[in-house]
Amino acid sequence: MDPVINHQPPSPATAETAIECRELTKKFGDFIAVDRISFRVQRCEIFGFLGANGAGKTTAMRMLCGLSYPSSGHATVAGFDVYRQQEKIKQHIGYMSQKFSLYDDLTPLENIKFFGGVYGVAEKEIRERSHDLVRSLGLDREANKLVGGLPLGWKQKLAFAVALFHRPRIVFLDEPTGGVDPVTRRQFWDMIYEAAEKGVTIFVTTHYMDESEYCNRVTIMVDGKIEALDTPANLKHRFACDNMDEVFYRLARTARRSDS
Amino acid sequence: MKQLFVFIRKEFYHVFRDRRTLLILFGLPLVQILLFGYALTSEVKNIALVVTNASNDVLGQQLTNQLQASAFFKVQEQQLSPTEIERAFKKGHIKAALIIPSGFGSDFIKARHATLQVLTDGSEPNISKTVLQYVTAIVQDFQRAQQPATSVAFTITPELRMLYNEEGNGSINYVPGVLALILMIVCTALTSVAVVREKETGTMEILLVSPFKPVMVLVAKAIPFLILSLVNFAFILLLAVYILNVPIAGSLFLLFMITLLFIATSLSFGLLISNATNSQQVALLISMMGLMLPTIIFTGFIFPLENMPLPFQWISNLVPAKWYYAAVKSVMLKGLGFAYVWKEMGILCVMTILLLTITVNRFKIRFT
């Protein structure tokens, strides 16, 4: 079941770099959550970040988003340094966490207006685009009802749309489809492809191996290290597996850490 | 600046869409003012007093009438035996008894000395003391009226005045107390819960990833409650003046400034709590137990601080509400000026700066 839009990533030679990490490390005391990871994400790429719970995915993502400082190593996001230019980074990224992250006691429109405002989108633009957005999500009738009453799938789609509203260059999605039914998940991935087509780089962590097949390239993290990084097709070929599930299992079973 | 405005508007949505917050915000002051003003009054009125008059003479009857005329007592005239009186006390039908012995009038006139027995229910010491004072005062008045002025050679009459509260209005010192309590609840509990809720729902992360400055999140959370607290302040003052007839003797502006300062202290407290916790329940528990209780106990508006053991008096110095209460009392009830409250204001200032410094520093450490 391939998504409707077949997204072609740019060829590596010509592509701009969206995210680059070199030896990026995060330690909490003696515990090395992220261990010298290096990778490069191209503009417009859908970059999957896989790993068991506790493998260090979220920690790595938090460093890239400017939520925490790396212990060592280098990284740039949208061309800005994660140590010194966090504020610049924040202006060019969108973020959607694994928890549903809109306000339940606000309407979809109010949520869009709030986050748009916080990201500094001009008021006129918010007014013009928010109604279109609500309509394109099929939320016309719910536009003035509180978000808390919407089904989870719709909430997640809305949250994604909100994360993209200020037109970020890169959007970080931390397990965006957790707990969402398969149909909505498909629709969600359609939205991801659509965004990538428009030039947004997608950095996504996920638990669902079928979703990893939708990514242009996939990273598999085990115990804080990157164990594999390639296109899903190449990974399957290399490990002689039929699907990503097997690839993941083969790599992840060596893990010594597991999340509580 | 525009971002801040957007944020504050969102905070108001939260407040006005949450029935519980609204109830705390506007229901609580109303209930507390009415409770403290009417129900929890320390004034003693309408005490059930039984008068057993065994004298059957004019003098005894006159004394009884005088007691009846007083608003303090609900007098029942009954000829009861000592055992019957005791039974009435035990059943709680009466709080006090006055026994006029036989020959009361003749003793007074002929022997120039008469006795009365006053019994009170000592299981309620405060009421008992008040009853004894009232009865003594009425009897003395009565005695003075019976004697021709010339017959008394020397008398000392204490002229009594309750300064700043001439009518003995019992609700007068509750108003500053309720003010302190309500502002503490609104600013500390509601603010801390409002911040922690964002952590619980995960929206805090989104805000921290946004270009919105983390410290501004605190500012944006505090401003709506600052505004609502000032509305509350006006509301309580209106209730106090028009319903409880508590006058505002001093400068309204000074009162406003002191309140603004106390609100700042309480908000800083709320923000500090919200930094230290990650769940709404814990935040609420800390605000309620950690601040409400000390506010009630150590402010002095219910339990006099002067009677507490010294260590407790020292502890009370750490409670912001104590200083606020003292300052409001000075300005509102005594009509004093800045010269008399600068110390309290200074202490609140220092507390606020201290709390804010800790809060802002901790907030940075946590999230970057």
Image (tube, rainbow, N blue to C red):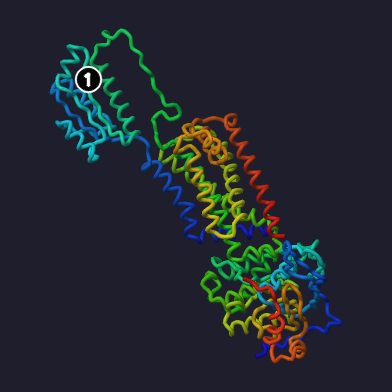
Q: Report the quarter where the C terminus of chain B lies.
A: bottom right
**Res. A164 in view:** no
Which chain is indicated by disc 1? B
Asked if B328 appears above or below A167 in the picture, the reply is above
Q: Quadrant of residue B117?
A: top left
User: Is residue A232 left or right of B347 when viewed as pictured?
Assistant: right
> Observer-nearest residue: B36 or B98?
B98
Tag count: 1
Q: Quadrant of residue A131?
A: bottom right
> Observer-nearest residue: A70 or B144?
A70
Q: Quadrant of residue B163?
A: top left
Residue type pointed to by label 1: Thr
Query: For the point 76% across and 81% down, which residue is it?
Result: A228
Q: Residues within 10 Å of mark 1 (few under 14, many from 20)?
A: few
**What residue does disc 1 label?**
B115
Q: Residue furthest left?
A: B56
Query: For the point 59% across and 84% down, which residue is it?
Result: A182
**Res. A23 in view:** yes
On the image, the x and y values in percent for residue A79 come to 82, 69
On the image, the x and y values in percent for residue B183 come to 52, 46
Query: For the point 66% across and 63% down, which residue is it?
Result: B207
User: Is residue A107 left or right of B24 when viewed as pictured?
Assistant: right
Query: For the point 44% across and 43% down, which residue is it?
Result: B239
On the image, the x and y values in percent for residue A234 come to 77, 88
Q: Report the quarter where the N terminus of chain B lies.
A: bottom right
Asked if B334 appears above or below A240 in the picture, the reply is above
User: Is residue A51 left or right of B22 when viewed as pictured?
Assistant: right
Asked if B35 appears above or below B101 in the picture, the reply is below
